Image: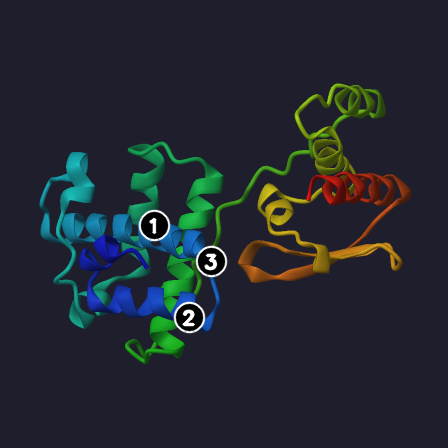
């Protein structure tokens, strides 16, 4: 964890972030997102409960002194006030508010079941905001072929292979970057990728993927 971030955290929040990173195996980026959400929440709670009237400069509020007594005073109604603030004042959309709710649920679950700070979880019944379900955006076959035909770089076979994997496997950029030769099994026509939350998943390769990988490996061996 970033030392500058930890200095701003009350001990309970520090412990939670360390738990998510070291025990639950969350990525540094995910842990930082937890911090951002919970820091904003505590800043709001302190202003709301103490009537500080500093909503315009919320993130400047010092939360390092927040302890168990303050945590135990938080109710479900307080959380609703916070979510209303994120929607009306910060104009957070449903997706952003859903992420904030997820962070809060994880934190209070930790306080109740792991840290034993709370006997009962005050936000047990807090629901995640409903998200609009949209159809996935995708390229047509013609658009995909057009994209592949315009791969032009200093390493065309490498880049052609990358685009082919994107189009056929639907992998994330971070998953592509994390690939190495031991992840790819050409004879079995499959590869393993490490996704969000350090979760490994198995993907099957079609002939187009296998051909593009083989062509790139030929180019790579000539360069090395």
In the image, is 222 to the left or to the right of 19? right
Query: Front-most of 131 and 210?
Result: 210
State the image quarter where residue 200 is shown: bottom right
In the image, is 202 to the left or to the right of 88? right
**Is tag 1's residue or tag 2's residue first in the polypeptide sequence?**
2
Q: Position of residue 123 (x, y in %)?
A: 38, 63
Quarter of the rendering occupied by the C terminus: top right
- In the rendered view, tell whether residue 135 sits above or below residue 38: above
The 10 Å Cα crowd at callout 1, few under 14, some 14 to 19, many 20 or more, is some
Residue at (31% x, 54% y) in the render: 38
Residue under pointer 3 = 27
Q: Position of residue 149 (x, y in %)?
A: 79, 20
* Residue 122 appears in the figure: no
Residue under pointer 2 = 22
State the image quarter where residue 9 is shown: bottom left
Residue at (15% x, 59% y) in the render: 64
Helix, strand or loop at label 1? It is helix
Cα separation between marks 1 and 2: 19 Å
Residue under pointer 1 = 37
**Is tag 1's residue or tag 3's residue first in the polypeptide sequence?**
3
The 10 Å Cα crowd at callout 3, few under 14, some 14 to 19, many 20 or more, is some
Quarter of the rendering occupied by the N terminus: bottom left
**Is tag 3's residue or tag 2's residue first in the polypeptide sequence?**
2
The 10 Å Cα crowd at callout 2, few under 14, some 14 to 19, many 20 or more, is few
In the image, is 53 to the left or to the right of 75? left
In this rendering, which labeled residue sits more in front, label 1 or label 3?
Answer: 3
Is disc 3 in contact with disc 2, using a CB cutoff of under 8 Å? no
Q: Position of residue 144 (x, y in %)?
A: 79, 25
Residue at (82% x, 23% y) in the render: 145
């Amino acid at each position: 964890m970033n030392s500058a971030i930890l200095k701003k955290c009350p001990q309970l929040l520090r412990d939670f972030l360390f738990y998510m990173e070291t025990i639950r195996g969350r990525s540094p980026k995910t842990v930082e997102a937890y911090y951002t959400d919970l820091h904003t929440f505590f800043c709001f709670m302190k202003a709301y409960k103490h009537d500080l009237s500093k909503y315009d400069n919320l993130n400047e509020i010092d939360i390092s002194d927040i302890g168990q007594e303050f945590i135990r005073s938080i109710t479900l109604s307080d959380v609703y006030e916070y979510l209303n603030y994120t929607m009306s004042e910060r104009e957070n959309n449903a997706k952003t508010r859903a992420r904030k709710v997820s962070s809060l649920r994880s934190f209070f679950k930790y306080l109740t079941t792991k840290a034993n700070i709370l006997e009962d979880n005050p936000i047990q019944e807090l629901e995640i905001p409903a998200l609009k379900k949209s159809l996935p955006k995708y390229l047509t076959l013609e658009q995909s072929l057009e994209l592949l035909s315009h791969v032009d770089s200093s390493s065309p076979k490498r880049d052609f292979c990358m685009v082919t994997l994107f189009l056929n496997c639907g992998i994330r950029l971070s998953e592509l970057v994390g690939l190495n030769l031991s992840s790819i099994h050409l004879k079995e026509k499959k590869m393993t990728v490490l996704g969000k939350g350090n979760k490994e998943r198995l993907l099957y390769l079609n002939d187009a993927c296998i051909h593009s990988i083989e062509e790139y490996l030929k180019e790579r061996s000539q360069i090395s």
